[in-house]
Amino acid sequence: MLLFLGGGGGVAFWFSLRQSIGSNLILYLVITVVMLAPTPLLMYRLYALIQASYTLERDGLRIRWGLRGEDIPLSQIEWIRPANELGLPLRIPLTSSPGAYLGATRVEGLGPVEYIASDIRTMLLVATPSKVYVISPADPRSFMRSFRRVFELGSLSPLPSYSVRPAAFLERVWADRPARTMMLAGLVLTVALFILVSLRIPTLQTVSLGFDAAQRPLGEGPPESLLLLAVLGAFSYGVDLLAGLFFYHYPSSKPVAYLLWGASVVVPILLLAGAAVAR
């Protein structure tokens, strides 16, 4: 899906650069936005899947899935069963897809159920007093044998309960004043770029975007071509925002996150200047 949507959006944007008719240009830009919009979510799910792990220890179970983390003490695990042997219909969250069965539902007879799984064929239910977790280890039978073995041995030092959700991470980022200021400034400037472009288009007959290798202005095109600057600015802001969030997650890489968020402010300023002087 990521390759299809990302490639399709890239091809549509390439075609938009070569259009001279306003209606076709807008059509290709709409296709570009529609196809590229889901790619950040898909990129996160791919990253989360690559980093995912279920670690069963004598003292408990550690679940890691992207920004989601859960440590369950062994004493809190009531039972583990294969999902296909439960005898109850499970409701898959609507936002799930192969490789990313994520989200929370409520199942009659089980109560709250949270999915942190990738494969519907290998799902196991892990029951705790507060909720049931759905996981999908690569080898469910081996996982259950390991659980029975560690359960018989008992826990010497139970894991402390630990739970991290993406929402908590975003709240931590939002509480960082420099990060919040740069992200909001970049968003405001990107919106201002769209507004300026929409105001400039009716005032122009033609427009030339850039110069060739000999420093001569490129061929003139329809004024709707200015929309390319707005789309480029929005795409740049989205990439800087997401990449910054990725690097902010690691304490040693926070300066890189600030640099990216700073770029999300500088780029729309340059594009605003370009749109203002376009002729």
Image (tube, rainbow, N blue to C red):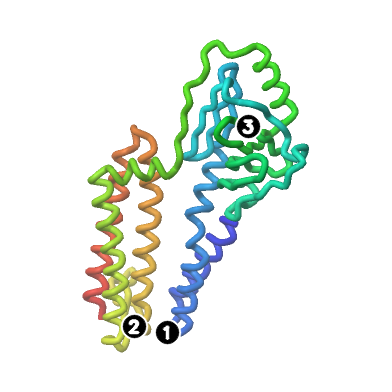
Image position of 176 (left or right of 48): left
Could you tell me residue 179's position as x and y percent? 27, 47
Looking at the rendered image, the disc whose residue lies closer to the viewer, 3 or 1, is 3
Residue at 61%, 26% (x, y): give it: 77
Task: Report which residue position mark 1 lands on.
Answer: 22
Tally of marks: 3
At x 43%, y 74%, the residue is 17
Residue carrying label 2: 223
Instruction: Report how far apart the C-alphas of labels 2 and 1 lie in the structure.
Output: 8 Å
Position of the N terminus by quadrant: bottom right
Rendered location of residue 62, percent (x, y): 55, 27
Which residue occupies the extreme bottom position in the image? 205
Instruction: Determine the residue positioned at 66% across, 37% down.
Output: 136
Residue 108 vertical position relative to residue 192 in the rendered view, above or below: above
In the picture of the structure, the residue carrying the numbered disc 3 is: 127
Label whose residue precedes the other's in the sequence (3 or 1): 1
Residue 257 left/right relative to 81: left
Q: Position of residue 80 (x, y in %)?
A: 68, 29
- Above or below, comparing residue 244 to residue 18 in the picture: above
Q: Residues within 10 Å of mark 1 (few under 14, many from 20)?
A: some
- Nearest to N terminus: mark 2 or mark 1: 1
For the residues labelled 2 and 1, say whether their Cβ atoms are less than 8 Å apart. yes
In-front residue for pair 38/111: 111
The amino acid type found where label 2 is placed reads: Pro
Q: Amino acid at mark 1?
A: Gly
Foreground disc of the pair 2, 3: 3
Question: Where is residue 123 shown, x and y percent of the image?
Answer: 69, 39
The quadrant where residue 74 appears: top right
Closest to the observer: 85 or 242?
A: 85
- Report, in whole angstroms, how far the alpha carbon at label 2 lies from the one at label 3: 61 Å
Mark sitting earlier along the chain (2/3): 3
Q: Type of residue at label 3?
A: Ala
